[in-house]
Amino acid sequence: MKRHIALVDCNNFYVSCERLFRPDLKTTPVVVLSNNDGCVVSRSNEAKAVGIKMGQPWFQAKDLAEEHGILALSSNYALYADLSNRVMSILSSYSPHHEVYSIDECFVDLTGTPQLRDVSYQIREHVFKWVSIPVCVGIGPTKTLAKLANFIAKRHPRSKGVFNYNDLSEDQQRRVLGKLEVGEVWGVGRRITARLAEFNIHTVQDLRAAHTPTLRAEFGVVLEKTQRELQGITCIELQEM
């Protein structure tokens, strides 16, 4: 039976938490700052659209913020933790096999779930109804592909917040992965991206189809496991909570 691993990710989580108590900010460009208001740690879609970067020091973004009317809020981690716990409690009801990966992300094993498409949309509706936090759902046969599926679900309006990689044919998989930059792969940072470019590996599909012994020799076993995950072979198991 093909595995169906879902990554449920809260959208712009800290900003969404703040908007929960400030509905007047629904369409206002908003960022949340780190401790001591040092760096940007969460951005609304409006703030992203004008060029505010994740992790950007706030003093560097002030001119842009003034130009576009961006509101900066201090972080409230006690609030975010409480709302995160509520979201994770809901997600745990969909499967006993799940992993809370971060404050705003959870892997949920939905293998064998009947009417999976309907359940995926139900998860979004359930979380929003009870916690008022928007989430997207990405589904794949491995955690790495579930991460990529979530990336697609967030950025393509036609998906309506849910994308199931398992529904794609092999040809569709090649075309979809061929449009994604290799840096979008879980665990592939800027340094590895630059090195991969030396081997003419620029897209996710390039990495999936790369010569495995060369990858292992040049980058080690970790990237080899990533490649196998992109091929649908489970190498990173759920750390169940």
Image (tube, rainbow, N blue to C red):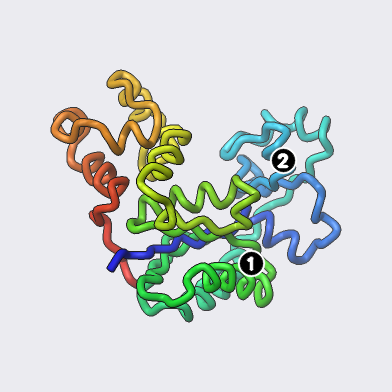
Q: Nearer the viewer, residue 135 or 16?
A: 135
Taking the spot 38% from the left edge, 36% from the top edge, the residue there is 204
Count every numbered label the image shows and give the total: 2
- Vertical arrangement, residue 146 with respect to residue 106, above or below: above
x, y percentage for residue 138?
48, 57
Taking the spot 38% from the left edge, 69% from the top edge, the residue there is 109
- Vertical arrangement, residue 187 with respect to residue 236, above or below: above
Q: Tell me the kind of residue under disc 1.
A: Leu
* Whether label 1 touches label 2, CB < 8 Å: no
Q: Tell me the kind of residue under disc 2.
A: Ala
Q: Mark 2 points at which residue?
A: 47
Q: Which of 62 and 112 is in front in this view?
A: 112
The first of marks 1 and 2 along the sequence is 2
Q: Name the residue under label 1.
A: 79
Left or right for 141, reference 34: left
Left or right for 71, reference 110: right
Q: Crowdedness of circle 1 by 10 Å Cα count: few (<14), some, many (20+)?
A: few
x, y percentage for residue 175?
43, 37
Q: In which quarter of the image is residue 194?
A: top left
Q: Which of 179 and 224 is in front in this view?
A: 179
Q: Which of 122 and 80 is in front in this view?
A: 122
Quadrant assignment for the C terminus: bottom left
- Vertical arrangement, residue 16 with respect to residue 88, above or below: above
Q: Crowdedness of circle 2 by 10 Å Cα count: few (<14), some, many (20+)?
A: many
Left or right for 220, reference 47: left
x, y percentage for residue 178?
42, 34
* Secondary structure category for the residue under label 2: helix
Q: Residue lying furthest top in this view?
A: 198
Taking the spot 73% from the left edge, 50% from the top edge, the residue there is 73
